[in-house]
Image (tube, grey):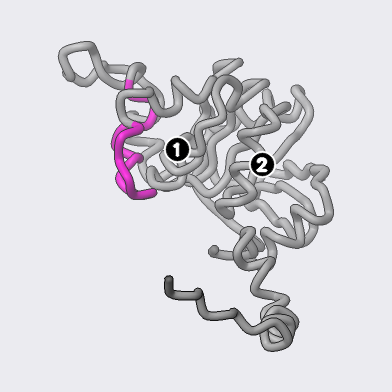
Amino acid sequence: MKPFRTHRGRVAPLDRINVDTDQIIPKQFLKRIERTGFGQFLFYDWRFAADGVRNSGFVLDEPRYKGASILVAGKNFGCGSSREHAVWALADFGFRAVISSSFADIFANNSTKNGFLTVCLSEGEVAELMQRSRGVNDYQLTIDLEQCEVRDDQGFRAKFPIDEFVRHCLLNGLDDIGLTLQHEAEITDYEALHPVQSALVT
C-alpha cells in the first residue's frame, strides 16, 4: 500500500450531502474482479443519462477540475452499503483524499485499508474550501498527515483529528497484510516449532 504523508493537489467541490456508496459506484459495475478500472464509473448516474450519453454540467467533468486529486464534499459522505468498491473508484479516478465534515464509519475504515485519506473538518471549514475551490482557478490544497493539517497558499490552515493507529498505518503504507508481515520473523519462529504433519494416506 502506498504511504500517505504529504499530498498537494487540485481540489474539486462536490456540494452534496449524504453521498452514498451507490452514488459513488452504482451496483451494476460491481462485477469486476480486479480493484482497477472502476474510476470510469465514478458517480455514473450523475455523469451519464440512462442511454449512456454524458450529462452536461457535472462538476467533475468541468475542465477546471480535470486532474483533481482532493474532493471536498458535504456531510455524511460514503453512507449506504459497505462496498469497498467506492474507495477503489475514487482512487482509480485519481483522488487521494476526501474532505468532509463527517463520514460513514465503514467507508472511512475501507479508506484506511486502501491508503485513502478521509479528512474531517468542521462544516464551516468545509464550506470555506468549497467556496475557494469554486472561486479560485486551479485551487490547490496541501494535506499534511504528519502535522494533521490542511492548508493552502491563500492563508487557510486547519488541523484535523485522526486516530493515531490509523495515522500510523497510512504514514507507513500498512494494510492488514502489511501489519501482519511486521511480525514475519515471529511467525516463522512459531511455525518452525510446530511443523506441519503430513496427511495420512488411507
Q: Residue at x 72, y 27 (%)?
A: 101
> Which mark sits nearer the N-terminus, 1 or 2?
1
Q: Position of residue 80 (x, y in %)?
A: 57, 20
Q: Residue at x 67, y 44 (%)?
A: 154
Mark linked to residue 118: none
The residue at which mark 1 appears reads as: 85
Q: Magenta span has 1? A: no
Residue toward you, 67 or 75:
75
Q: Badge 1, how many Cα within 10 Å: few under 14, some, many 20+?
A: many
Q: Position of residue 193 (x, y in %)?
A: 73, 86
Q: Position of residue 15 (x, y in %)?
A: 55, 19
Q: Is residue 148 left or right of residue 55?
A: right
> Looking at the picture, does residue 18 appear above or below residue 155?
above
Q: Is residue 77 left or right of residue 66?
A: right
Q: Position of residue 40 (x, y in %)?
A: 29, 37
Q: How far is mark 1 from mark 2, CA to CA?
A: 13 Å
Task: Check if mark 1's residue and mark 2's residue have beta carbons within 8 Å.
Answer: no
> In the image, what residue type sits under mark 1?
His
Q: Residue at x 45, y 43 (%)?
A: 88
Q: Which residue is most to the front?
A: 202
> Quadrant of the rendered structure where residue 71 is?
top right
Give the magenta-colored segment's residue range: 30-44
> In the image, what residue type sits under mark 2?
Asn
Q: Residue at x 58, y 32 (%)?
A: 72
Residue toward you, 70 or 4:
4
Element marked by disc 1: helix
The residue at which mark 2 appears reads as: 109
